[in-house]
Image (cartoon, rainbow, N blue to C red):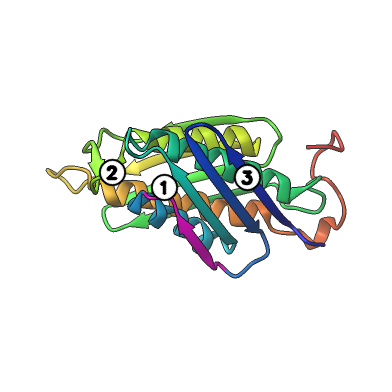
Amino acid sequence: MSRTARVERITKETKVLVEIDLDGTGQAEISTGVGFYDHMLHQIARHGGFDLTVRTVGDLEIDAHHTMEDTALALGAAFDQALGDKAGIRRYGSATVPMDEVLVRAAVDLSGRPYVLHDEPALAPYIGPVYPTSMTRHIWESFGQSARITLHVDVLRAARPGGHPDAHHVVEAQFKAVSRALREATAIDPRSAGVVPSTKGAL
């Protein structure tokens, strides 16, 4: 069964195309105009094992907010579409990922109920010239809403003693942890072939 999706989201502010194959090999073609965001979306493909295409044209002459938000919404919608009725999947996934001094835990439930909790320390306002670190929470909220999932992201450790959090490491470790959790949750469970993993019979 093909677990693929194609989502287009077009507004007066952005034009977004997302294509995904949940059973891919981690190949990605990403272009949003926000370099660090592109790098993070590559993490989702590589560490999630998903083939992913993202092409976004947004109003970056204003700021990066609309571009990042609408991309996250389209990406979440693509995940939701590709999962179909969710029969046979593991449903739950979690991962704890270290990145040098940073440690992040992510947990996901492909529940059909959007709920996102996100905890990170105060960070430098920007990574690179365009990515505002305040948007990371909003990315997860937007993604979780349109993917219809429960998502918890917690930064457990963020700085060496006496030092300050490295914003690049803090954000990248989050994307890697969420990707690994999604990889586990979306995987087919050979013990539950064709069965929706819920006593309700639907997710």
The residue identified by callout 1 is: 174
In the image: residue 129, left or right of residue 44 = left
How far, Cα to Cα, is label 1 from label 3?
Answer: 26 Å
Which one is in front in this view, the residue at disc 2 or the one at disc 3?
3
Q: Which residue is rendered at x = 12% and y = 43% of the image?
A: 162
The residue shown at (17%, 42%) is 164
Secondary structure beneath label 2: loop
Of the two numbered discs 1 and 3 in the rendering, the one whose residue sits closer to the viewer: 3
User: Where is residue 45 drawn, in percent x and y?
Assistant: 53, 60
Above or below residue 115? Residue 131 is: below
Within 10 Å of the Cα at label 1, are there few (<14), some (14-19), or many (20+) other Cα atoms? many
On the rendered structure, is 194 left or right of 61?
Answer: right
Residue found at the very far front of the displayed protein: 12
Q: Nearer the viewer, residue 88 or 16?
A: 16
The question of residue 31 being in magenta is answered with yes
Which amino acid is tagged 3? Answer: Glu
Mark 3 lies on residue: 8
The Cα atoms of the two marked residues, 2 and 3, are separated by 24 Å
Q: Secondary structure at mark 3?
A: strand
Q: Is residue 181 above or below residue 68?
A: below
Q: Earlier in the sequence, mark 1 or mark 3?
A: 3
Report the amino acid beneath label 2. Answer: Val
Give the quadrant of the N terminus.
Answer: bottom right
Q: What is the residue that sits farthest to the left in this orientation?
A: 162
N-terminal-most mark, 1 or 2 = 2
Q: Residues within 10 Å of mark 3 (few under 14, many from 20)?
A: some
Question: Pointer 2: residues within 10 angstroms few (<14), some, or many (20+)?
Answer: some
Which residue lies under the disc numbered 2? 130
